[in-house]
Amino acid sequence: MQFIRKMLKNEEGATAIEYGLIAALIAVAAIVAMGRVGDSLTNTFNNVATTLENGQ
């Protein structure tokens, strides 16, 4: 019976899971942000290349 009480009071596993979830959310946010920055840079470089080709 004491073993079950200890297991119910033990929160170390829950803390590890919470840290894992936080890390996963940060990773997803970073991937989305980097993708958007990449798209923006692609558009910027395409605009520069077009301007240089047209000689403006």
Image: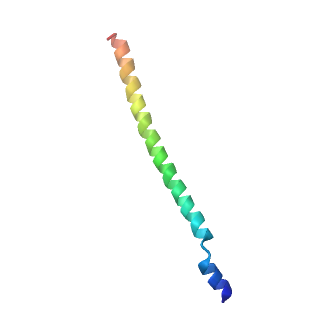
At horizontal 62% and vertical 84% (from top left) the residue drawn is 5
The vertical placement of 25 against 7, above or below, is above
Q: Is residue 6 left or right of residue 52?
A: right
Which quadrant of the figure contains the N terminus?
bottom right
Q: Residue at x 57, y 69 (%)?
A: 14
The number of numbered badges drawn on the structure is 0
Q: Is residue 31 above or below residue 52?
A: below
Q: Tell me the residue at 44%/42% (across/down).
A: 33
Where's residue 40, x and y in %? Answer: 39, 33
Pick out the residue farthest to the right: 3
Viewer-proximal residue among 54 and 4:
4
Which quadrant of the figure has residue 46? top left
Q: Residue furthest bottom?
A: 1
Taking the image as shown, residue 19 lies to the left or right of residue 53, namely: right
Q: Give the x, y percent position of residue 21.
A: 52, 59
Closer to the camera in the image, 46 or 7: 7
Residue 19 in percent (x, y) is at 56, 60
16 vs 52: above or below? below
For the C terminus, give its image quadrant.
top left
* Residue at (46, 48) in percent of width and height: 29
Direction from residue 9 to residue 44 in the image, left or right: left
In this rendering, the answer to whether 14 lies above or below 9 is above
What colouring method underlies this structural image?
A: rainbow
